[in-house]
Amino acid sequence: MRIVSGIQPTGNLHLGNYLGAIRNWVRMQDEFTAQGHECLYFLADLHAISMPHVPADLAANTREMVAALVACGIDPERSILFNQAQVPQHAELQWLLNGTARMGWLNRMTQWKDKAGKNREGASVALFTYPVLQAADVLLYQATHVPVGEDQKQHLELARDIAQKFNNDFATEAAPVFTQPDPIIPPEAARIMSLRDGSAKMSKSDPSDMSRINLTDDADTIMAKIRKAKTDPEPLPAAKAGLEGRPEAANLVGIYAAMAGTSVDAVLGQFGGEGFGKFKPALGELLVDRLAPINARFIALREDRAALDAILARGASRARALAVPTLERAYAALGLVRG
């Protein structure tokens, strides 16, 4: 098995990023590499330029994301950790696959419709062909499995369609150029909401820093944010059904369950009937305990640019070694003469 997954480099990483994606990467690394399988994790900086961006911020955020991934448990010795821009084979294969992908396929992509909005004529070509680069990201490494959430199922299906059509058009059944990757549905990721509004996702773009727990927050800051988190006056219920219509209460209980590695019902079995005056300090202490080692490692790594660049360079070298044979086969299959 070879597992491939990417994440866009964003700044101000918060609890939602950790519980929603990064923790699952660590779990997969620990499970699959122990069985002799390979995990490739990349920073999707080429994808990031499909939307308006500040170049200096993109570079800084790429390094910050590497620091966060390593601090959270991604081991560059066991996993291949790199950024797309250092592996030009991603962009090369995307161009080759553009001859196989179809306009109609891309027009049906939900994310294209959502991100382009009503001004599709003003959107970048990169945004339109974003799913072809995603296909190249996984087909380049002969990925057997790709972790996907609900919002990425459509893109993996497109990658499989592109692989199948390319193989049908330019290869033989006995010697296909590309492996069709299967999805891995990771354990249900915790959906972490804003501490100020239980109906909105925790986000770095929220103007209020009190809405989120940042990976850089110290113990006092975490405790203060949890203490001031929006709640309601009712005590916690004894069962999950009692959280219906109480988004802020459901969010805090969900955070506790995710951090403790238990169920919502188990948390309510412990705190049901109690008010938030007792629950909030317990939640804050749990977060401080679990996040303190990550926080310390992240802050130390973030300041060591040379170490971060070395991690990316080593990972990119390993990734290129896996990518080149597939790319050469694709060139040959298309009849493109290479020196």
Image (cartoon, rainbow, N blue to C red):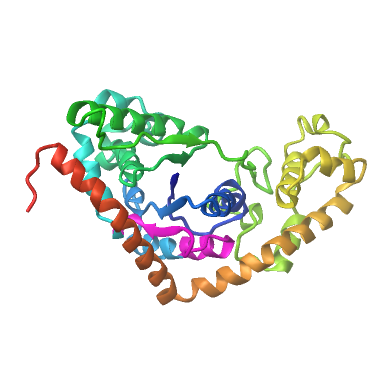
- Compared with 64, 104 (above or below) is above
The answer to whether residue 67 is magenta is yes
Measured as percent of width and height from the top left, residue 258 is found at 70, 47
Q: Quadrant of the N terminus?
A: top left
Q: Nearer the viewer, residue 130 or 327?
A: 327
Percent of width and height locating residue 226: 75, 55
Q: Residue furthest front?
A: 174
Q: Which residues are magenta?
A: 64-85
Residue 118 at x, y percent in the picture: 35, 29
Count of labels shown? Answer: 0
**Residue at the spot x=20%, y=41% of the render?**
330
Q: Is residue 270 left or right of residue 147?
A: right
Residue 284 as seen in the image, left or right of residue 203: right
Q: Of 247 and 156, which appears nearest the observer?
A: 156
Tell me which corner region of the image, top left, top right, bottom left or bottom right, holds residue 56.
Answer: bottom left
Residue 102 in view (yes/no):
no
- Left or right: residue 65 versus residue 180 is right
Query: In the figure, 294 relative to 262: above or below?
Result: below
Residue beneath the point at 73% across and 68% down: 220
Residue 191, visible in the rendered structure:
yes
Classify 9 as above or below 113: below
**Residue at screen point 62% across, 49% down:** 19
